[in-house]
């Protein structure tokens, strides 16, 4: 989790984690934690002032599939919440990071590869809210001098958290199901290619862009990429560790339509040129690392 990386880097008492949910023990006891509702503007200001905040990482959002199921809530959290953060960051001269996503592109965007600057036009409230965040952040930068920084994340794969309602979550669920049940039902077509990234690369990129000197940044929103694969390719790599894994496909039409409107590959040459972005994990390393954290010994022992 990014909070552990930042606490290791900056000191545990210098990084405050907030949420509206009760944290796990390992999170709660690792450093400061406070309750913060992104829609409570007054409370957010108090947090920034009372704790003399200088950097703000704004991760609050409803993801793609969950957002489509509750558009009013997604609009409130993803857009109104962003407005609160932008105003507070500008008022108190914060360095602000807001993540964007492959979901910020749409069916009229170039998909293979997708450059930093092109037509976007997403068709989910999640994607629309992220394009809004990119443009508002850039506007606040030029209008008010806000130090706004943004990365378009691909699908992020992590052993630390359960799938959270995103279209790329199949790439996390397959590991849990392979270990627990030895079978996995995928809700996307086997040939659906999407850009992906292991969590450690995501955390590294986020910290690197936040620490990059302002004069090195030629833009305020960057694509970042590590690998691109299909469910079928991922399943084949997973089966090298869990040979008895059975994979079936039961396509969710909503998620498939979302995936078909997203990039197949990200062009991240600007990030690599401007601030030296370089990923560490390709698909084989990602799969091996996921199993080393989640543990495949029990399934392999059963198979033997």
Image: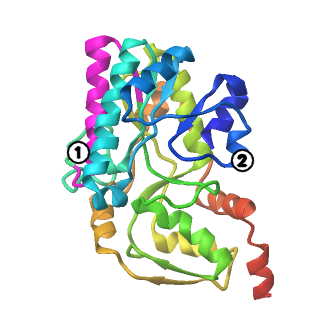
What residue is pinned by disc 1? Answer: 120
The color scheme shown is rainbow
Q: In the image, what residue occupies the spot 58% across and 60% down? A: 283
The answer to whether mark 1 and mark 2 are in CB contact below 8 A is no
Q: Secondary structure at mark 1?
A: loop
Left or right: 46 in relation to 180 = left
Left or right: 33 in relation to 293 = left
62 is higher (above) or lower (below) than 53: below
Total marks in image: 2
5 is higher (above) or lower (below) than 216: below
Q: Position of residue 72 (x, y in %)?
A: 25, 50
For the record, the magenta segment spans 122-149
Q: Main secondary structure of the magenta part?
A: helix
Location of residue 88 (image quadrant): top left
Q: Position of residue 85 (x, y in %)?
A: 38, 27
> Is-magenta flag for residue 146?
yes
What residue is pinned by disc 2? Answer: 25
Considering depth in this image, is 61 or 203 the residue closer to the camera?
A: 61
Sequence-wise, the earlier of marks 1 and 2 is 2
Q: In the image, what residue occupies the spot 56% across and 71% down? A: 174
71 is higher (above) or lower (below) than 213: below
Q: Position of residue 269 (x, y in %)?
A: 42, 37
> Is-magenta flag for residue 295?
no
């Amino acid at each position: 989790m990014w909070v552990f990386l930042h606490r290791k880097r900056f000191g545990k008492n210098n990084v405050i984690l907030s949420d509206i949910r009760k944290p796990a023990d390992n999170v709660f006891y690792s450093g400061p934690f406070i309750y913060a509702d992104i829609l409570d503007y007054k409370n957010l200001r108090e947090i920034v002032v009372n704790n003399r905040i200088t950097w703000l990482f704004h991760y609050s959002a409803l993801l793609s599939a969950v957002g489509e199921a509750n558009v009013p809530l997604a609009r409130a959290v993803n857009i109104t919440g962003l407005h609160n953060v932008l105003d507070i960051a500008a008022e108190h001269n914060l360095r602000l990071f807001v993540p964007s996503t492959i979901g910020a592109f749409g069916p009229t965007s170039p998909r293979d590869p997708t450059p930093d600057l092109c037509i976007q036009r997403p068709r989910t409230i999640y994607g629309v809210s992220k394009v809004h965040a990119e443009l508002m952040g850039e506007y606040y930068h030029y209008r008010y001098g806000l130090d706004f920084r943004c990365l378009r994340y691909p699908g992020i794969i992590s052993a630390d958290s359960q799938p959270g309602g995103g279209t790329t979550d199949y790439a996390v669920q397959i590991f849990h199901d392979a270990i627990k049940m030895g079978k996995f039902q995928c809700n996307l077509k086997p040939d659906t290619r999407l850009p992906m990234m292991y969590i450690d690369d995501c955390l590294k990129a986020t910290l690197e862009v936040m620490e990059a000197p302002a004069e090195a940044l030629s833009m305020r929103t960057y694509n970042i990429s590590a690998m691109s694969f299909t469910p079928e390719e991922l399943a084949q790599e997973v089966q090298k560790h869990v040979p008895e894994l059975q994979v079936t496909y039961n396509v969710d039409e909503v998620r498939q339509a979302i995936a078909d409107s997203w990039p197949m590959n990200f062009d991240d040459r600007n990030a690599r040129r401007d601030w030296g972005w370089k990923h560490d994990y390709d698909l084989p390393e990602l799969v091996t690392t996921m199993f080393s954290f989640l543990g495949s010994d029990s399934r392999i022992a059963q198979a033997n």
